[in-house]
Amino acid sequence: NEANEEEDTVVEVGGHIGVHTLTIRENIGSQGELYVFEADPENYSLLNHNLSQNNFSDVFTYNKAVFDDREEIKIFRNEGNTGASSVKRDLENYYSISCIKLSEFLKGNSLDHIDLLKLDVEGAEYEIIRDVECCLDRIDQIVVELHSRDLSREQIKEIKEILSNQGDLKQIE
């Protein structure tokens, strides 16, 4: 099921500055819902600016890190690539931001059905997939970029097992 029907619900974790967000919003139709999380405050500001410039005022954006049950987390900012900040890499420049568990967000917002969950979270994939394992039956499709430099082989294996238990797992190396 591609995200292009009139009432699709999409959750994007790691919205960066909105490049994919704009495309998703254009394709989910006027009745669709789009929820976007971006932890980096500068990226979040640009994300909202880009949405505004394209007259998309109906996208729900959150300046929070999606992670585990911690209240706050350090994000290490990669100054050379604003899309590569990470919870796992120990870079010199970091900031602290409040966290939210995706499973709690879905339940708290009565999101009983998600057409597409997109994860581009630079090393937080393991924690998020483990957290939403209880909710996978309500998610039609998941697109996740696994960052092998930030995850152990065991974590990648477990992520793939969790996802393959829910259906057809397609991989692009």
Image (cartoon, rainbow, N blue to C red):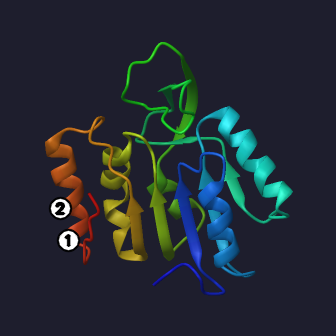
- The residue labelled by disc 2 is 161
Residue 28, percent from left and from top = 64, 78
Q: Are marks 1 and 2 in contact (CB under 8 Å)?
A: yes
Q: On the image, which quarter does residue 111 sit in?
A: bottom right
Relative horizontal placement of residue 11, taking residue 91 as reference (left or right):
right
Q: Residues within 10 Å of mark 2 (few under 14, many from 20)?
A: few
Q: Nearer the viewer, residue 160 or 96?
A: 160
Q: Residues within 10 Å of mark 1 (few under 14, many from 20)?
A: few
Residue 151, percent from left and from top = 26, 39
Which residue is drawn at the image coordinates 47% and 65% (left, top)? 117
Q: How many marks?
A: 2
- The residue labelled by disc 1 is 165
Which residue is drawn at the image coordinates 47% and 48% (left, top)? 101
Which label was assigned to residue 153? none
Residue 139, percent from left and from top = 42, 73
Residue at disc 2, secondary structure = helix
Q: Amino acid at mark 1?
A: Asn
Q: On the image, which quarter does residue 162 sit in?
A: bottom left
Q: Nearer the viewer, residue 69 or 136?
A: 136
Residue 105, percent from left and from top = 54, 56
Which residue is drawn at the image coordinates 49% and 32% (left, top)? 85
Q: Amino acid at mark 2?
A: Glu
Q: Quadrant of the C terminus?
A: bottom left
Residue 27 higher or lower than 132, as above or below: below
